[in-house]
Amino acid sequence: MSRSRLLPLYEFFWHLSEAQKAGLPLRTTLDDIAQNAESRKLARIYADIALSLQSGQMLADALDAHPRTFDDTLRALVRSGEESGRMSAAFARCAEIVRTRDNRAREMRRVTREPKITAAITVGLGALSGADTLVDGAITFVLLGGAAIMGWRFSPPFRRFVFSILLHIPVIGAILRRDGWARFLESLCFLYQSGIPLRAAAETAANLQPAAGLKKIFLRIAEKISHKSGVLEAFAAEKGIDPLVMSMVRAGERSGNLAQSLNEAVLRLDEENDRALTALRQYTGPMLAIALGFLIWRFL
């Protein structure tokens, strides 16, 4: 099994948390992490952070220079820990959220493997059927696939464009919406539990959302909260919100335990998506067989 790209980030925060518990200097710990980093890129990032601390910067400010490695939620948690003096707890919470994301990413890759294969073959068939020869079709498919992969990895506008299209596809759109809400509520819960004001927590969580349509909803919720609206009122003002989310927010506001209710909503949304993805996989097998059958019939 390949090593997750998120695992080094989990190890980074876990080591910082344990070092803080032991009373070790932060700069010394960072130097040690940089020397034992598994890649030159990470070693450079960690060394740069250590150098920034040596020059008098706060850790959160040093992390701001590397937004692609440390996103808004992680930086906000570290900043909250520095301001409150609870650095070890902040690092532990960062490690927890990275581990949660890693587990979810692994599960998502597992359950979407067959749909991805089906989609790739479908696109390939489209390229081959419109080409004069098999070679021309293969070249077209490779070029299209390469452009899509490069755009997805290096172009945020391209990712937003893809998400905006996928949100309008039946079944897939519903899965992405639930996943978007789960990620928003999860980050909101982590940040709120760390002592960050609810409005700032909602705004930070919203900015992590790659789907522009959902991001606008989350930012409007954050804006309403900033105008002293109740949490339930801010959520209820948006149309089309999952009834489960509304139910959990209502329960959390009435009980005074909003964080626990948000966490429960995340678990329930993830469970619904697991069932939806399992059902989707049951259809991708026949679709893949049909696609392969068409390919054989078309070119043999």
Image: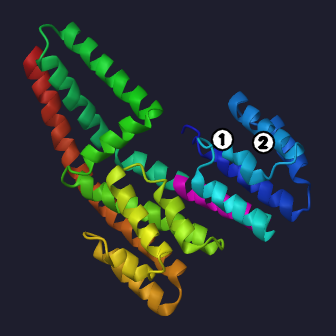
Quick check: can you spot residue 57? yes
Disc 1 to disc 2: CB gap under 8 Å = yes
Q: Quadrant of residue 292?
A: top left
| Residue 231 lies in the magenta stretch | no
Q: Which residues are magenta?
A: 88-101
Disc 2 marks a residue whose amino acid type is Ile
Give the mark, 1 or 2, whose residue is nearer the N terminus: 2
Taking the view exactly as shown, the residue that stands out farthest to the bottom is 255
Q: Looking at the image, is 63 positioned above or below residue 96?
A: above
Instruction: Please report the residue visible at 54 percent of the width from the left and 39 percent of the height from the top.
Output: 1
Residue labelled with disc 1: 66
Disc 1 marks a residue whose amino acid type is His
Residue 260 x/y as whole percent: 52, 80
**Count of number-bearing discs:** 2
| Residue 93 lies in the magenta stretch | yes
Instruction: Please report the residue visible at 58 percent of the width from the left and 53 percent of the height from the top.
Output: 72
Residue 184 x/y as whole percent: 45, 63
Q: Secondary structure at mark 1?
A: loop
Instruction: Please report the residue visible at 16 percent of the width from the left and 42 percent of the height from the top.
Output: 286
Residues 26 and 160: in front is 160
Instruction: Please report the residue visible at 13 percent of the width from the left and 21 percent of the height from the top.
Output: 296
